[in-house]
Image: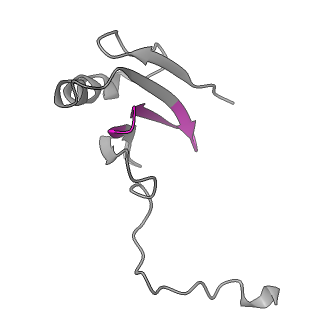
Amino acid sequence: MQLGARWRVGDPPHRSVPPALHATIAAQQAEHPEASSWTLTWLEGRPRCALEHAVIVTLDAAGRPLVLDGADPASDRASASEDDEDEDDDWLL
């Protein structure tokens, strides 16, 4: 289990943030000067660095930095159509 952490904008990223994300974190700080802090969490073994509600910086499946819209919690999920019915659980009835 990995615990999360917080750090202030302008400070170096927390020591558990992979170096592959450092440049992307710095770039996002420059794009969002109104933000004041980062929150690091882990999801399925991948780091998720949230710059308040602006963006989430993480790694994709290949280990490349990925920037997601932090205001949309569904932005990192596969897109589905609005009328997509979930028929996989019909057997539960």
The residue positioned 54% from the left and 20% from the top of the image is 5
What residue occupies the far front of the structure in this picture? Answer: 34
Q: How many marks?
A: 0
Query: Where 46 sits versus 1, above or below?
Result: below
The residue positioned 45% from the left and 52% from the top of the image is 73
Query: Where 93 sits versus 39, above or below?
Result: below
Residue 20 placement: quadrant: top left
Q: What is the basis of the colouring in this image?
A: one colour
46 magenta-colored = yes
The residue positioned 31% from the left and 25% from the top of the image is 35
Residue 10 at x, y percent in the picture: 29, 12
Left or right relative to 93: residue 61: left
Residue 90 placement: quadrant: bottom right
User: 38 or 25, which is in the foreground?
Assistant: 38
User: 87 or 71, which is in the foreground?
Assistant: 71
42 magenta-colored = yes
Instruction: Specify start and end residues of the magenta stretch as a single range.
Output: 41-56
User: In the rendered image, which quarter contains the N terminus?
Assistant: top right
User: In the rendered image, which quarter contains the C terminus?
Assistant: bottom right
Query: Where 60 sits versus 20, above or below?
Result: below
Left or right relative to 77: residue 68: left
Residue 87 placement: quadrant: bottom right
Magenta stretch, main secondary structure class:
strand
Residue 64 at x, y percent in the picture: 31, 41
What residue occupies the far right of the structure in this picture? Answer: 93
Residue 9 at x, y percent in the picture: 33, 16
Left or right relative to 41: residue 7: left
User: 93 or 60, which is in the foreground?
Assistant: 93
